[in-house]
Image (cartoon, grey):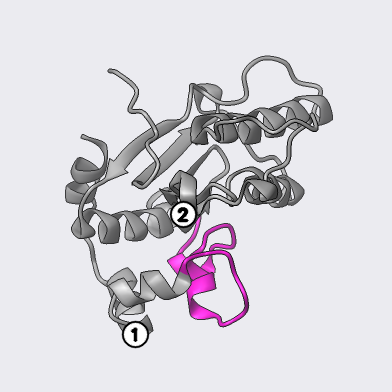
Amino acid sequence: MKTEVLSPGNYYHIYNRGNNGEPLFFEEENYIYFLKLYDKYISPIAETYAWCLMKNHFHFLVYLKSEEEIDISQLTYKTSTQPKIVSASRQFSHCFNSYAQTINKKYNRTGSLFEKSLERKRVESEKYFLKLIYYIHNNPVHHGVSSSISNYRWSSYKSFLLTNPTRLKRTEVLDIFDGLENFIFYHNYNQNLEEINRMLFE
């Protein structure tokens, strides 16, 4: 299957997993470090609407900023010369390569940490958007890691229940759900996971 090009000005479901289904995260500090790298490399070029980190995979719902929306001064590079073109694919590559190199060194492992190149699917409808947010937040329950969406630490769900500053597009998401009450109700409603899986991955 041909890999979809990451095109600025569009929403995407971004996901990947560990090579052969092996862990990406081995202890708490790995999750924290991954999110720091994500903020460093991805936040300047994308807005994040939902995320979840699982032991051996992850999911993000993002909007890729257009060239006019990117503040290039926020980008960090190893050299003093900034590239003429900012590439979302390159930024994701920097993020995940940096993480993989650190993990391989720390745990004395070799070979690929991630299974393949970044998986992505464009989000083209509000229905898809709503179902995807639920799917991402419900991932820990779906995989039997948590008894409820609200009990899992490494997802964006709890951030929507708080009022502290966040880069997450909290207000925009809650507006789409017509408020926090409906957001919570939607996540507690018994969703048809087979239908959602077909919609998200076909």
**Main SS type for the magenta part?**
loop
Residue at the spot of label 1 = 181
Residue 26 shown left or right of residue 140 in the figure: right
What residue range appears in magenta?
145-169
> Is 132 rendered above or below residue 191?
above
Local packing at callout 1 (Cα closer than 10 Å; few below 14, some 14-19, many 20+) is few
Residue at image position (22%, 60%) is: 126
Q: Is residue 103 visible?
A: yes
Mark nearest the camera among 1 and 2 is 1
Using the image, tell me which numbered label, if any, was put on residue 142. none
Question: Is residue 164 located in the magenta-colored stretch of the structure?
Answer: yes
For the image, the number of numbered tags is: 2
Residue at image position (59%, 50%) is: 44
The C terminus lies in quadrant: top left
Q: Is residue 31 visible?
A: no
Question: Is residue 108 located in the magenta-colored stretch of the structure?
Answer: no
The N terminus lies in quadrant: top left
Quadrant in the picture for residue 107: top right
Residue 102 shown left or right of residue 91 in the figure: right
Tell me where residue 39 appears, x and y as whole percent.
64, 51
Residue at the spot of label 2 = 140
Q: Describe the element under mark 2 as helix, strand or loop.
A: helix
Residue at image position (62%, 33%) is: 96
Local packing at callout 2 (Cα closer than 10 Å; few below 14, some 14-19, many 20+) is many
Tell me where residue 56 appears, x and y as whole percent.
55, 37
The type of residue carrying mark 1 is Glu
Q: Describe the element under mark 1 as helix, strand or loop.
A: helix
Residue 183 shown left or right of residue 113 in the figure: left
